[in-house]
């Protein structure tokens, strides 16, 4: 068949995406570095095989696509993307379009977009795992608007659809904007997962609940405000049994979590932008701690037997998770707002909330309300939107009780606790940074602003030589 689109990299995500594209009626040429993979993929494609053109070389791939071509890269992020672009360069014409659909670091995408490539280039965030790629991911496009418009019909056809029927495929902005939004998505994904894991820990170690009962609890929560993909799969994994031993599956899985870097990139970028995302940072930290299992074992041997039993209501736990989730998303959206201005992308926050409503890993019922609240005023922190302010007001007391009980009984809730800490800072107009400012002025003559507006910006510790405070300090 005549194709105008191609795909390179038939790993799990690439293969699923190619099948999705073919299924939606777009003939597609595919190539994989190992020819065997391509042949097996084609042989297993069933009736879709007739819309798929398997090719044995890059030149054959390019020849199989009618210009102007669009070629999707689904190769590992980093050097492999640069190598693939370099290999394609002599084969493509300037109007051909290369689309990096991997989890690229958006700085790499910015660099590639600015590097004068001999072809058109888009960086596209794709979320939803294998299932999403196969049947409907959320797609966050970045690059020149005109290039996105060229492939938008394909992307909208393969994307998930929100409940109102809108396809979850949206152009986010120039250059690395799509990969940036995907990165923050993943930071929030890490945080959501961590907060769910913290409530799981409280049920398991604090309440002594068995895994299937925890699964029932998550399933019940999935009927309420928390309805979301991650709560749904948490119910499923907690209910599952190990075919080998018959034990609950969760009970035989080692508690060290890996990461490919996107959550960490979010935390690092937030630091560069000086925008607080403590819940995401806590989630990254917790994964890092999880990986140090020998140290944790030594810690338990030296300092005691870990968390103790406690009494908390499951309803309070649910409310605490609701509060934590709102706080985390408020931080994530605020970061996007700041980044959009810092990078000149003018990111459309309501559109981002809408694109996350279906297909992606963090899809949830709450994103509908977030889209509405952000559409009212996207520069206002989400916690101050009337709808969420009210919801927080009723849920924060439970979060406070849960955090307090957990601290008293030795349970680590890094994400939920730091969410609460941020909230308490956020609602304190007279904070403690006057002390920081005084210290900075003392040792570095940095000056400070005064509450009373007087035009005097230094403390007495420097006026007229040494003060008694200075002497005492020495
Ligand atoms: C998604 C996921 C997906 C993947 C990430 C995170 O949105 O579909 O985020 O892209 O799971 O690579 O993986 P790590 O947990 O390994 O960082």
Image: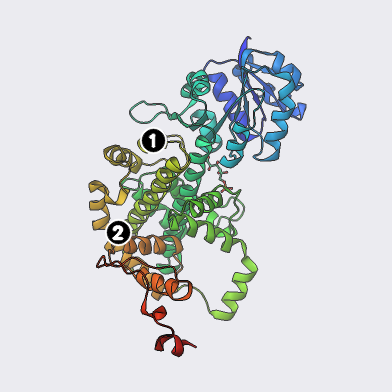
Return the mark for residue 460: none
**Residue 116 appears left or right of 433:** right
Label 2 beta carbon within 8 A of ligand 1: no
Q: Quadrant of ligand 1?
A: top right
Residue 103: percent from left, percent from top: 58, 39
Residue 18, quarter of the rendered image: top right
Front residue (pair 336, 418): 336
Crowding at mark 2 (Cα within 10 Å: few <14, some 14-19, many 20+): few
Position in image of residue 91 (x %, y %): 73, 19
Depth check: give the residue in front, 302 or 41.
302
Label 1, on which residue? 348
Secondary structure at numbered mark 2:
helix
Category of crowding for the residue at label 1, using alpha-carbon neighbours closer than 10 angstroms: few (below 14), some (14–19), many (at least 20): some
Q: Is residue 162 above or below residue 253?
A: above
Image check: 19 left or right of 187? right
Q: Which residue is mark 2?
A: 315
At numbered mark 1, what does the secondary structure look like: helix, strand or loop? Answer: loop
Question: Which sits in the foreground, 246 or 148?
Answer: 148
Q: Is residue 134 above or below residue 150?
A: below
Q: Residue furthest front?
A: 464
Is residue 51 among the parts visible in the rendering? no
Whether residue 432 can be seen here: yes
Query: Nearer the N terminus, badge 2 or badge 1?
Result: 2
Q: Where, quadrant-wise, is the N terminus in this rendering?
A: top right
Name of the residue lying farthest toward the top: 2
Q: Nearer the viewer, mark 2 or mark 1?
A: 1
Residue 242, x across and y down, in percent: 57, 52
Distance between the alpha carbons at the discs numbered 2 and 1: 35 Å
Tally the numbered discs: 2
Residue 65 at x, y percent in the picture: 65, 14
């Amino acid at each position: 068949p005549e194709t105008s689109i191609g795909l390179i990299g038939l790993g799990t995500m690439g293969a699923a995406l190619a099948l999705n594209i073919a299924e939606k009626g777009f003939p597609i040429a595919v190539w994989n570095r190992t020819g065997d993979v391509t042949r097996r993929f084609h042989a297993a494609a069933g009736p879709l095989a007739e819309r798929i053109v398997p090719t044995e070389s890059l030149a054959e791939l390019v020849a199989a696509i009618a210009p102007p071509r669009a070629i999707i890269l689904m190769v590992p992020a980093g050097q492999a993307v640069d190598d693939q672009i370099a290999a394609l360069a002599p084969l493509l014409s300037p109007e051909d379009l290369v689309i990096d659909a991997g989890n690229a670091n958006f700085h790499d995408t910015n660099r590639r977009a600015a590097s004068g490539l001999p072809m058109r280039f888009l960086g596209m965030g794709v979320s939803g795992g294998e299932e999403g790629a196969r049947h409907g991911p959320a797609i966050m496009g970045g690059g020149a608007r005109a290039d996105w418009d060229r492939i938008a019909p394909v992307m909208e056809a393969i994307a998930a659809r929100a409940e109102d029927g809108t396809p979850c495929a949206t152009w986010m902005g120039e250059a690395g904007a799509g990969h940036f939004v995907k990165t923050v998505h993943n930071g929030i994904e890490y945080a959501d997962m961590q907060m769910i894991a913290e409530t799981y820990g409280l049920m398991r170690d604090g309440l002594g609940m068995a895994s299937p009962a925890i699964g029932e609890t998550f399933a019940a929560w999935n009927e309420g405000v928390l309805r979301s993909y991650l709560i749904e799969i948490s119910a499923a994994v907690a209910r599952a049994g190990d075919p080998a031993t018959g034990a609950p599956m969760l009970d035989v899985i080692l508690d060290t979590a890996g990461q490919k870097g996107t959550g960490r990139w979010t935390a690092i970028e937030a630091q560069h932008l000086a925008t607080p995302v403590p819940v995401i940072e806590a989630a990254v930290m917790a994964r890092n701690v999880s990986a140090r299992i020998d140290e944790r074992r030594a810690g338990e041997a030296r300092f005691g037997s870990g968390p103790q039993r406690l009494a908390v209501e499951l309803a309070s736990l649910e409310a605490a998770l609701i509060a934590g989730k709102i706080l985390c998303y408020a931080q994530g959206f605020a970061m996007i707002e700041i980044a959009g201005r810092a990078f000149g992308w003018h990111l459309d926050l309501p559109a981002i909330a809408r694109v996350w409503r279906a297909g992606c890993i963090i899809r949830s019922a709450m994103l509908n309300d977030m889209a509405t609240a952000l559409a009212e005023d996207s520069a206002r922190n989400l916690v101050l939107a009337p709808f969420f302010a009210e919801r927080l007001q009723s849920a924060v007391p439970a979060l406070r009780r849960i955090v307090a009980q957990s601290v008293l009984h030795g349970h680590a809730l890094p994400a939920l606790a730091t969410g609460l800490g941020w909230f308490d800072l956020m609602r304190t107009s007279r904070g403690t940074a006057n002390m920081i400012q005084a210290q900075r002025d003392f040792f570095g003559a940095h000056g400070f602003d005064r509450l009373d507006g007087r035009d005097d910006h230094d403390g007495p510790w420097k006026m007229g030589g040494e003060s008694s405070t200075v002497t005492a300090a020495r």
